[in-house]
Image (cartoon, rainbow, N blue to C red):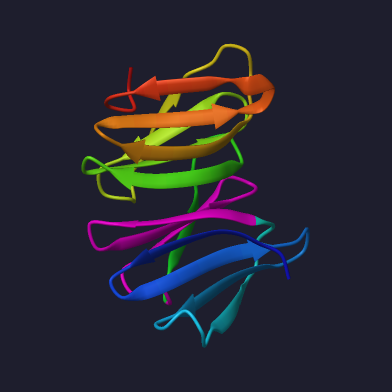
Amino acid sequence: MYLYGMTYGNEKYIAVGGSSSISYICYSTDGVNWTTKQVSCRYLYGATYGNGKYIVVGDGRYIAYSTDGINRTSKTVGSSSWQSTVYGNDKYVMVGNNGYIVYSTDGINWATKIFSSNSELWESVAYSNGKYIAVGYNGYIASSANAVN
């Protein structure tokens, strides 16, 4: 089992990963003892927690949201495979391939923004000090105060 991303929130660790045929969401309250659930999608890459919700993202436009980290609602969003997600400044942000970055204030409804006309593959996103920073292939880096501009 390959694990690619994790988050911590509401006294629970969530780790995500998978393969080309099945993915996994693992959760723990102590970081030592873990429970694993299979998810019928390919590759989960990222997870975040904020404002009472866990968000996990992955291949095939897959996202899932949950208030307890265990029972989740899944959906497809946009036209990208999602690599990473973060919560900051009352906003969830996901980054993926083809230059796509999407954002949401509730973790359910998402707006799309293409930050790169070069079809860059975004690999990771972080939030700190009032800025979202996304990094990707070929050394591409972008920053935004609001994930919109």
Choose top left, top right, bottom left or bottom right for residue 122.
Answer: top right
User: Residue 39's spot in the image, x, y percent?
Assistant: 61, 70
User: Residue 72's spot in the image, x, y percent?
Assistant: 43, 69
Q: Quadrant of the C terminus?
A: top left
User: Residue 100's spot in the image, x, y percent?
Assistant: 52, 28
Choose top left, top right, bottom left or bottom right for residue 40.
Answer: bottom right
Q: Quadrant of the N terminus?
A: bottom right
Figure label count? 0
Write the residue at 41% across / 83% down. 30
Query: Within the magenta stretch, is there residue 140?
Result: no
User: Residue 84's spot in the image, x, y percent?
Assistant: 52, 45
- In the image, residue 75 sits, relative to residue 24, either above or below, namely above
- In the image, residue 105 sits, relative to residue 54, either above or below, namely above
- Looking at the rendering, the stretch of residues picked out in magenta corresponds to 44-70
Please state which of residues 9 and 54 is positioned toward the viewer in this rendering: 9
Write the residue at 72% across / 67% down. 22
